[in-house]
Image (cartoon, grey):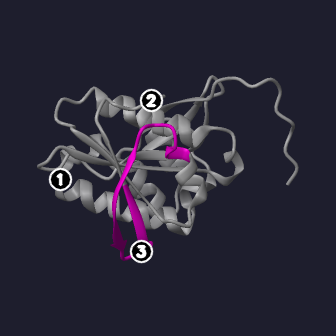
Amino acid sequence: MIRAMRGPARPTSVRFVRLPIAALTALLNGNLAGASSAAGVPLTGYFMAPEALGLWRLRVDQIAADPPSGRWIARAAVAEPDGVVVGHAGFHGPPDAAGMVEVAYSVDPVYRRQGYARAMLRELLRRAATEPGVKTVRASISPSNAASLATIAGFGFTETGEQWDEADGRELIFELTNGNHRP
């Protein structure tokens, strides 16, 4: 694949568009056009990748069990000012009893290494800062995921431990007191 050379650096920004349960269900049914229609933005084939479909199944089940959690999860990330969907992001769910939310973001491979992951994280942190119930923002990252480790660098996260994830294996846990991030 040949990529065009980028011109002068410009700030990368994204806005989030909620993926309603109708969009997630359409994705699970292999209906990208229906999912795009339900979301109100043109989703890409990246949303139909096998690992994404597993995520959408998890999120559909989560929303079915707890409908208000839908406002925290499953968002398409739309690059501004271009209006192109470059990936997806959200939180794993609403704040837990201690006020912790965990960020999740993924950039379509076509758009990687252009600052979109940092833009997604920046917007997630801004969102968390507006929520009075959020005290801590968490990121759990595989120690071999250099791109995600680089993405959180500079935002003020502190490594607080590690955990074992059934799907991803060993993960390092990073936390940030809400509102204490650096853009």
Q: Nearer the viewer, mark 2 or mark 3?
A: 2
Query: Mark 1 is on which residue type?
Result: Asp
Q: Which residue is mark 1?
A: 66
Q: Earlier in the sequence, mark 1 or mark 3?
A: 1
CA–CA distance in space, label 1 to label 2: 32 Å
Asked which quadrant contains residue 42, the reply is top right
Q: Is residue 71 magenta?
A: no
Task: Report the residue marked by disc 3.
Answer: 167
Q: Secondary structure at mark 2?
A: loop
Let me know if residue 56 appears in the view: yes
How crowded pointer 2 is (Cα within 10 Å; few <14, some 14-19, many 20+) is rated as few
The x and y percentages for residue 149 are 53, 53
Query: What mark, if any, has residue 182 been given in the picture?
Result: 2
Q: Secondary structure at mark 1?
A: loop
Residue plotted at (66% across, 27% down): 82
Q: CA distance from mark 2 to mark 3?
A: 30 Å
Q: Quadrant of residue 86?
A: top right
Residue 127 position within the rendered picture, expressed as x and y whole percent measured from the top left: 34, 31
In the rendered image, the residue lying farthest to the left is 97
Q: Nearer the viewer, residue 47 or 130?
A: 130
Sequence-wise, the earlier of marks 1 and 2 is: 1
Q: Quadrant of the N terminus?
A: bottom right
What's drawn in magenta, residue-wise? Answer: 151-173
Residue 29 seen anywhere in this rendered image of the structure:
no
State the residue at coordinates (36%, 77%): 166
Who is closer to the viewer here, 70 or 11?
A: 11
Q: Residue at x 48, y 57 (%)?
A: 27
28 over 136 or under it: above or below:
below
Label 3 is placed on what type of residue?
A: Ala
